[in-house]
Image (cartoon, grey):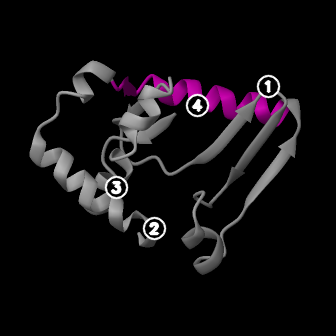
Amino acid sequence: MLVPLHSDSWLVNKAASAYYEDLLNCGVRIYRYNRGFVHAKTIVVDDALAMVGSANMDNRSFELNFETNAIVYDRAVAAHLKQQFLEDLKDSEELDRERWLQRGKLTRFTESVARLLSGVL
């Protein structure tokens, strides 16, 4: 999973990072993009199916902002999106689980508070 190192909102960044430990514990590899802001929402499955769009997977995106994603069954589109993802990884750093678990109590507290608000961010 590729996420921005810094998002356009401190609170959104804290809310998002509050979920990283759960994801890391499930085996998800998280990369933080450090060359600016990445806002892409893409998924490639089995080099054949791709999803691309503006929506986050939350009620705010679907119900309030009327955002949507397109599902595309096309190997060429999937290959292009996969290649772009791999290029973006070159400007990213993988989040180390053990190091992440050592972050301070204040950081964990602010993430927890932000997580409570994540449904309306």
Question: Disc 4 or 3, which lies upstream in sequence?
Answer: 3
Q: Is residue 119 rendered to the left or right of residue 84?
A: left
Question: Disc 3 or 2, which lies upstream in sequence?
Answer: 3
Q: Which residues are magenta?
A: 76-95
* Kind of residue indicated by mark 3: Ala
- Who is closer to the viewer here, 71 or 81? 71
Residue marked by disc 1: 47
Q: Quadrant of residue 48?
A: top right
* Kind of residue indicated by mark 4: Phe
* Kind of residue indicated by mark 1: Asp
Q: CA distance from mark 3 to mark 2?
A: 9 Å
Judged by depth in the image, the label closer to the viewer, 2 or 1, is: 2
Element class at badge 4: helix
Residue marked by disc 2: 119
Is-magenta flag for residue 118? no
**Where residue 25 sits in the image (x, y, percent)?**
43, 27
Q: Quadrant of residue 113?
A: bottom left
* Kind of residue indicated by mark 2: Gly
Judged by depth in the image, the label closer to the viewer, 4 or 3, is: 3
Q: CA distance from mark 2 to mark 1?
A: 32 Å
Judged by depth in the image, the label closer to the viewer, 4 or 2, is: 2
Question: Disc 4 or 1, which lies upstream in sequence?
Answer: 1
Q: Residues within 10 Å of mark 2 (few under 14, many from 20)?
A: few
Q: How many marks?
A: 4
Element class at badge 3: helix
Residue marked by disc 4: 85
Judged by depth in the image, the label closer to the viewer, 4 or 1, is: 1
Residue marked by disc 3: 15
Residue located 39% across and 28% down the image: 92
Q: CA distance from mark 3 to mark 1?
A: 31 Å
